Amino acid sequence: MEELKNPLKINMTASLIGALAGVCLILAPMVISAISLYQFYFVYFGIIVIIFALAMFMFYRKRSRQFTEFITRRDQLLNWEYEEDQYVEFIGELNQLQRASNKKRIGILLLIIVAVSVLLFFLLSADMRWLSFIFFGFFAITSLLVTIVFPESFKYRAMVKPYITIIDKDEAYIMGRFHKWTKAKAKIKNYDNGSQAYKVLAINYEAMTRNGRMFQEWTAVIPDPKNPEMLSEAKRWVNRINKLSDENEAQKKEQKSWLERQFQKMTGKSKKDN
């Protein structure tokens, strides 16, 4: 089998670049005399950026190790390899949907940014109103970059060769990304764009995204849905994913929270008393 590239390395590199940006923020007032009066703010935000970036680096390093372990078991898991024409066409359809969704979000976000900037302009003192323009410029540019760049980054990640899907009960490599979950809902469904119909294995799980923690669905197109053996194998793995998620959820409900255990100790209650 062709060797898979570790998709977490680019995230680790980006985190380190973010930490470097934080250091530059701290040093900027020392180099640029025009902003030396605002050194406190630059240091404050620089420290926040560094802490956040290093936390993300540690998170992605842990995920990188999990991915390495996951790949060592790939022969025991569900493996699908794709023909280039089929895979590229499917990714192109998903990329168009992603762009359309981002355009709607950016419109709402820009309205919010404008409203907050105007509010800041009137709330701040006359000599500090320039901060409202910086706020608007920074977040407006960031939002536009996310709208333009993110769809392309999705396509870039998904188009990394080899074109392959690997699925386990609580982990997966889909569209060039490593996924891991404790609770997920998997199913076989049809994806029809009007001109082309696909059958996919869809996995919906909760994860941290750029919009916060939310549920997202990732779809792995089935290479040959007319092959009964391949379709049966896909259904078996769907059942395994859902079964493990149900077991994890039941176990979670049975476990008492830390506060509940501390309360029991304080009141002198024990398991025998219950």
Image (tube, rainbow, N blue to C red):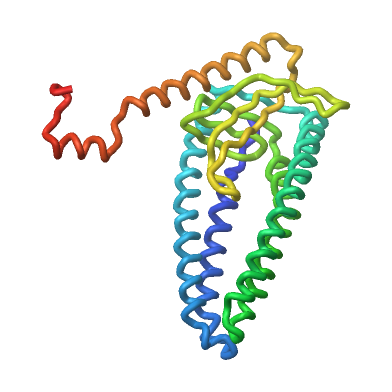
Q: Quarter-wise, where is residue 129 in the image?
A: bottom right
Residue 175 location, x and y as percent? 67, 36
* Count of marks, rendered view: 0
Residue 139: image location, x then y, percent = 65, 64
For the residue pair 68 and 250, the one nearer the viewer reads as 250
Q: Residue furthest bottom?
A: 33
What is the residue that sits farthest to the top in this orientation? 228
Q: Residue at x 55, y 63 (%)?
A: 18
Q: Residue at horizontal 46%, vertical 49%?
A: 59
Of residue 47 and residue 171, the one placed in the foreground of this image is: 47
Residue 249 position within the rendered picture, expressed as x and y whole percent measured from the top left: 42, 26
Residue with the most extreme front position: 122
Q: Nearer the viewer, residue 246 or 51?
A: 246
Give the position of the N terminus as an image quadrant: top right
Q: Is residue 83 above or below residue 98?
A: above
> Which residue is at a point 63% across and 33% down the rendered structure image?
217
- Rendered residue at 39%/23% (across/down): 250
Decide if residue 127 is on the left or right side of residue 68: right
In the image as oriented, which residue stretches furthest toward the left? 268
Q: Quadrant of residue 106?
A: bottom right
- Residue 145: quadrant of the picture: bottom right
- Residue nearest the viewer, comparing 224 with 75: 224
Placement of 21 over or under 96, stated as above or below = below
Report x, y in % for residue 200: 70, 23
